[in-house]
Image: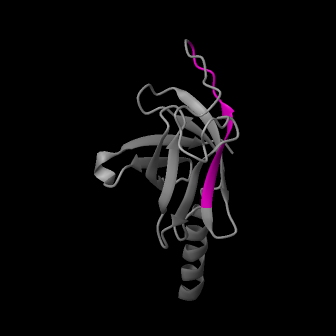
Amino acid sequence: MQKNLLLAAFAAALFSGNVFAQDISGTWQQIDDKTGAAKAIIKINQETNNTFTGKIIKVTPRPGYTPRETCNNCPAPYTNQPILGMEILKGLKHVSGTNNYEKGRVIDPLAGKVYDAKVRLNATGKRLTLRAYMGISTLGRSQTWIRLD
């Protein structure tokens, strides 16, 4: 009886997502940390080397804003690259036993700056917080992304 109860508890935890970290692969709405407006839709994929990359698949129109078409003052290999289709997030690695992903790089195509990046997926798997920083995480900025799929 007790064995069945433990098995049932394990199965319930497994299906609720509390035993194993959820995957960040999928489609995400990027939210501007300054304005709260939607900026772009990002598709995150897991690569064969078990890192995660994110590509802009749609730029979200915003009132009073003309979207830029190419990467502004970006370093190689991003120089003058179209923003739509650009791989802005790369190299994220899952931290075993957590909902954290670290050691990534993210580019801001509007500012032309490349930052270190880490991500934390919330418990429901519906939101992630991307932290972009240079050197020290406490000196960075965070954005919330909302899962679309």
Residue at x-position 31% and y-position 54%? 136
- Most extreme residue toward the top is 64
Give the side of residue 100 with respect to residue 69, left or right. left
In front here: 26 or 12? Answer: 26
Secondary structure predominantly adopted by residues drawn in magenta: strand
Residue 24: % across, % down:
60, 56
Residue 138 appears anywhere in the view: yes
Residue 67 placement: quadrant: top right
Residue 139 x, y percent position in the rendering: 29, 47
Q: Position of residue 113 (x, y in %)?
A: 46, 41
Residue 101 seen anywhere in this rendered image of the structure: no
Snapshot colouring:
one colour
Magenta stretch: includes residue 50: no
Q: Quadrant of the C terminus?
A: top right
On screen, residue 75 above or below 2: above
The quarter of the image holding the N terminus is bottom right
Residue 5 point in image, percent of width and height: 56, 80
Q: At 70% from the left edge and 40% from the top edge, which residue is drawn?
A: 85
Bounds of the magenta segment? 52-63
Residue nearer the viewer, 11 or 42: 42
Question: Can you tell which quarter of the image residue 45 is in?
Answer: bottom right
Q: Residue at x 53, y 43 (%)?
A: 75
Q: 102 or 74: nearer the eye?
A: 74
